[in-house]
Amino acid sequence: MADHLIAIGALVLIFTISTFTSVHMGALALVAAFAVGSSVAGENADDVFGGFPGDLFVVLVGVTFLFAIAKNNGTIEWLVHAATRAVRGRIALIPWVMFLITAALTAVGAVVPAAVGVIAPIGMSFCVRYGISPLLMGLLVINGASAGGFSPASVFGSITNGVVERNDLPGNPGLLFLMSFLFNVALSVVAYFLFGGRSLLGRRAEDGGGGAAGTGGALATESAGGGGSVPVAPAGTAPAPGGTTTVAFAPATTDVGPRLDRSRALTLIGLLGMVAGALFLDYNVGLMAFTVVVVLTLVDADAAKGAVDRCAWSTVLLVCGVVTFVGVMERMGTINWLGDSVAKIDSPLIGALLICLIGAVVSAFASTTGILGALIPLAVPFLMDGQVGAVGLIIALAVSSSVVDSSPLSTSGALVTANAPEEQRPQVFSALMKWGMSMALIAPVATWALFVVPGQG
């Protein structure tokens, strides 16, 4: 028992130290794997490295490498531009466009913080121009990232499905993706009407520039109540005396946005093919991603320049480090010991709720990727008796651990706060903190009721 407590204490220290200091969680986890493995478990370096997740390494590097190329060759810019033009000036739809674009990016392999980092500044520029609540926009961007985050080709999905497969648990990658997506859509509908979405209904805007962020256009207009159009001042213009608005005319431009050239078209085909292969043919996501990368590099060598440097190496180190340490704990029997302790709770349903609550609360302050790698193995012994459905609990744990990314103490929430208009950042920070902490309590209960209770054996 003492050995198990030492291993658990080390895991708690990993999350605590990395939360309150600048030490990288993955590096800490590797050091802990070496220290605990050699001094407590009696393992040598080969034993410790035996738990290194080579399959996850290939997936994480492959999909983030591909995403970096897609950003380099303008595919991401084209996607954003095409989607924003498709709403034809309907301001009420712009937050949902940002939701869908962010979901699409994470679904095809973008790391969640990277996708939020790309879309949040674009979304906030729409907030300034069209009077959309930064909180509303930020939550839809974050929820969009979580919605796409559990596709079989995504980082979260690859981690979750990989851990499930390695522990011989029944899994359903398609159902995990669908339920996560629908839950985040429902959550976004609530946020939309709570934080000003109703006031956007019926409003329209036209931008002669055609830019994704509304830059370089002639004059923005907004529909008046009688169906006509009235000018909307660009950001930074001030009301003139008498209540009128002084509107600055920007030079007209013929910019129609990025074109769908051969490189971008091939990138889109490659991304869709990768998702289809993972969903319907059970192909390895990482190997498919590298295949697409090689083809795109042969077609457009310039797009691959610097892409390796922009792979999500920090996430790779984090996930591989945590999973390596969890492997040491598994070989020591600590995971089984913990799971058996949870399984001894009189009510299996209460035990399942407890696991979901732990995942949500810890994830609000620490890394979601690290939590997914650590808590799913914890649930393995608990699930073996069959009183709680494995697929339902995994979905509940995954969703409740990811929707709390809206907390400003997480990377996604911090990115939204940093990109909010400067004068509104304190309010956005405070609101995201309240929303994120409420999610840490509401999401586990809701997902437990939706996915775990119906599957009780």
Image: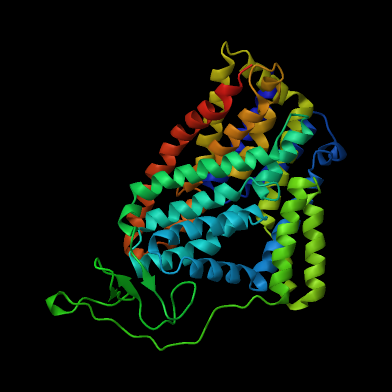
Q: Is residue 244 left or right of residue 260?
A: left
Of residue 289 and residue 424, the one placed in the foreground of this image is 289
User: Can you tell which quarter of the image residue 49 is in?
Assistant: top right
Residue located 63% across and 50% down the image: 24
Question: Where does residue 394 sit, x and y in percent of width and height?
Answer: 64, 32
Of residue 104 and residue 440, the one placed in the foreground of this image is 104
Question: Where does residue 434 sit, x and y in percent of width and height?
Answer: 37, 42
**Residue farthest right in this picture:** 46
Q: Is residue 140 left or right of residue 45?
A: left
Quadrant of image for the C terminus? top right
User: Can you tell which quarter of the image residue 274 is in?
Assistant: bottom right
Q: Is residue 122 above or below residue 388?
A: below
**Residue farthest front in this picture:** 227
Quadrant of image for the N terminus? top right
* Picture colour scheme: rainbow
Q: Is residue 314 above or below residue 4?
A: below
Question: Where does residue 411 sit, x and y in percent of width and height?
Answer: 52, 52
Question: Where does residue 188 sit, x and y in percent of width and height?
Answer: 45, 47
The reply to whether residue 112 is visible in this rendering is: yes
Residue located 70% across and 20% down the image: 337
The reply to whether residue 366 is visible in this rendering is: no
Q: Is residue 31 above or below residue 266?
A: above
User: Can you tell which quarter of the image residue 82 is in?
Assistant: bottom right
Q: Is residue 148 left or right of residue 226?
A: right
Residue located 50% across and 55% down the image: 99
